[in-house]
Amino acid sequence: MKIASIVGARPNFVKLAPISKELRKSFTEVIIHTGQHYDYELSRIFFDELGIPTPNYHLNVGSGTHGFQTGEMVKKIESVLIKEKPDLVLIFGDTNTALAGALAAIKLHVKIAHVEAGLRSHDKKMPEEINRILVDHCADVLFCPTKTAVDNLKQENVIEGVYLTGDVMVDSLNHSINIAISKSRILKELNLNSKDYSLATVHRAENTDYYERLNYIVGAFCEIENIVFPCHPRTRVQLKQFGLWDRLKENVIIIEPVGYLDMLLLEKNAKMVLTDSGGVQKEAYILGVPCITLRENTEWLETVEDGWNLLTTGVTKENIIKAVIDFKPKHNRSDVFGKGNASKNIAHIIGVR
């Protein structure tokens, strides 16, 4: 069986790493990289650190509006699929790459498997929510990380081909955390002590594209002591465009985007994480670090219900600062994301279908 794995952004790479390792024990895998994340630090370093084979195809799509980027990806992915004739296309998460891969495959009548199926924030203003819904309704096989994801699909009458596998990010993290501890020098380079700083990431359009919202976030960060902020290239552009960059730079430790191992170590040793990233929310939970999510909702409701993630409903300066001061998890975490065998489960299911 030939499987085409389609990736293009950081969250895709983290999910691909353990699955690719399992797939290659029994199947032929072709990796198609759309180039959605075209910056070196956001792309190639993840392949190097996670031991992912070099992509067979790099489509170099780059940035653009959602419609332009998705359209370019569909055209280029279609050409590769026609050439390679895979038996199955494997797509990951909720990115434009995932949607483009699903659209290209379904038009060619190639079977689709979706890793991280069934997530819902119930907010259709989020591009990612639209991507998730469309991809799930295109897919033939749906690999769900949690019971909540299975239930979400059932509510949409998606029942056939649905499997509860656990979350592949647990697999990646369990494999990589000890490597990060032994190899990463990020704490020493930044002169940071464990549990003596907070880690922040911001990249979603709902936060970066509106002056008022980004100004609230910058205002809060400037008053929270010792924040480390790996700054996404897109966020940097918006901060400078809105005239907020210099103010933030004076009060926050701004660093370039970091690789997976450095990010894991920064997350593990932070006293708190502030983020609008779905993946970082989940990594914080798995690592046992309190997380404040700079959003009105989340696709990872389990982390909120378990008391380790707090939504800043109404993302204002005051709400963010209050959350940082008041939020403290009150009980232990559960294994809601599985026990680290999701990749084996997925490879097995693909083999027996």
Image (cartoon, rainbow, N blue to C red):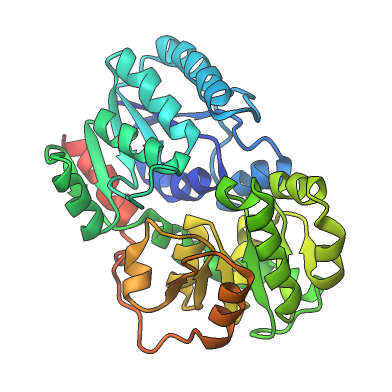
Identify which residue is drawn at 35% across, 79% down: 333
Quadrant where the image shows the N terminus: top left
Q: Which residue is pictured at 32% across the width and 32% down the height? A: 134
Residue placed most toward the observer, 305 or 73? 305
Q: Using the rendered view, name the quadrant where residue 61 is placed.
A: top right
- Quadrant in which residue 174 is drawn: bottom left
Question: Percent from the top left, x then y, of residue 24?
Answer: 39, 38
Residue at screen point 52% across, 22% down: 73
Instruction: Please identify the residue farthest to the front as the structure is shown.
Output: 212
Report whether residue 25 is seen: no
* Above or below, 13 relative to 28: below
**Residue 181 percent across, percent down from the top left:** 62, 73
The picture places residue 353, in percent across and down from the top left corner, at 16, 34
In the image, 87 versus 144, the foreground residue is 144
State whether residue 276 is above or below residue 115.
below
- Position of 34 compared to 300: left or right? right
Asked whether, in this view, residue 105 is left or right of residue 213, the answer is left
Residue 330 appears at what percent x and percent y? 39, 89
